[in-house]
Image: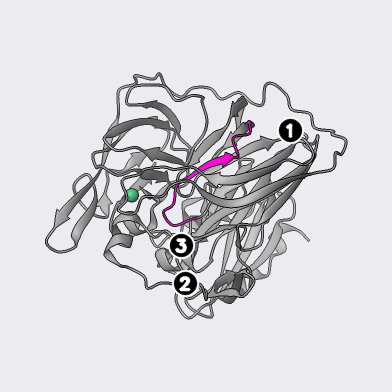
Amino acid sequence: MKANHHSHHALHTFTPDPMEAAAAPDPSAPPAVRIALEAKATNWEVSPGVTISGYGYNGQVPGPVIEATQGEPIEIAFTNNLSEPTLIHWHGLRVPAAMDGTQATQRPVAPGETFVYRFTPPDAGTFWYHPHANETEQLEKGLYGAFIVRGADEPVVDREQILVFDDVDADKQGRLSKFGGFRERHDGREGDIRLINGKAEPELTIAAGQVERWRIINASSARYIRLSLGGATFRIIGTDGGLIEAPVEATEVLLPTADRVDILVGPLEEGQTLSIDSLRYLRSTMKVRGKERFGTLKVGPAKPSIASIPSRLRTIEPLAPIDATPTRNVKFSVGLSLRNIIDFNVNGETHHTDKPVKVGELQIWDVENASLMDHPFHLHGFFFQVLSIDGKAPAFRSWEDVVNLPPRTTVKIAWIPEDRPGKWMYHCHILEHHEAGMMGHFDLVR
Ligand SMILES: [Cu+2]
């Protein structure tokens, strides 16, 4: 069927935005991939006998993996069968503003309503989707899923695994702890049930001698994953915005909340058992966490390998020199207040309204963390390059939509606002900090 023969307009219950015309499929484009997604109450078994009464997309946690092809239109008919409003943000995808799925760009989808998201993913990479309404509760209850976009020229591996990390704060029966205590508002919500793909500390397998691509997503509300595979060396090949220029060997990698990384695992030797851990990471929380296990990797009998990893994966042209003069300063801070006890601010205010950005004008932002805690900075809808962290270049060049802001540190980023005008935002991706106001809105104007 041709893309212009869609009959899905009848499902459109949201008053069309003028922006939406820009998002309509090109009639000459190939047929869209069509997906139906439903949010509903879901009983989610994290381990035998421990079931969380939460939410799921299509009755599962994580939601179904959405697979798309770079440059091919996709259409997602989303139905809300929860008892509360929700909407879906396509995290990391460079979509038109009207499709970004925030309350700045659309009215939340009310219970019983359907909204059709349409866009064409321009980049190959590992992305994810999650609500952008009452998100502290909706994500914790299980609303999140992987969104994979495949390019034409990907490294050849023996097998791919998608690993979505999360943690849940619930008791031994799976009853979710009460939301919103002081520690939770300060630290963000962390839990002692540690999950990969919705299961507590699962056992994964790999064949000896083979090389797998693991696409890893940190979907937790607040927890930082300092990933280690029992000290084994792996190769980083991609970050938020797809492949990096060349594989980078590592024994650990830090994923703040919402971050992604693609790694090559293997070749390993038969009989090895590796612990999939998050190493001790201090981000100035009230509760300190040491090394904790998320899963186990068992190496099975050897199988032949067809893996072929080029030494050069991609070219990423630098957008600006390391010492480029900032065009804007964005300051994250935490302060005490009479009203909220603790305020999470951007440029001195909660839910900051920032100056407009003009299409095509190179943005150089000094993003300063003036507080004593880490915050993961997330920019909606655009990739940026990290030019420097307190004046020092990062270990390798990459495209990102999340970068950690360590305490008392300034991260200089560069990005190009392409011609996708509308309402955009950036925020701390510790969900409780975002909810408390650590965010900025801005208009992208022509
Ligand atoms: Cu934060």
Range of magenta residues: 220-233
In the image, the residue with mark 3 has its CB under 8 Å from the nearest atom of ligand 1:
no
Q: Residue furthest left?
A: 338
Residue nearest the observer in this picture, 166 or 124: 166
The amino acid type of the residue labelled 2 equals Asp
The amino acid type of the residue labelled 3 equals Asp
The residue beneath circle 3 is 17
Mark 1: give few (<14), some (14-19) or many (20+) Cα within 10 Å.
some
Is 183 on the left-hand or right-hand side of 242?
A: left
Callout 2: SS: loop
Callout 1: SS: loop
- The answer to which quarter of the image holds residue 11 is bottom right
In the rendered structure, does residue 43 fall within the stretch colored magenta? no
Expressed as whole percent of the image width and height from the top left, the position of residue 238 reads 60, 35
Expressed as whole percent of the image width and height from the top left, the position of residue 237 reads 63, 32
Q: Which mark is residue 372?
A: none
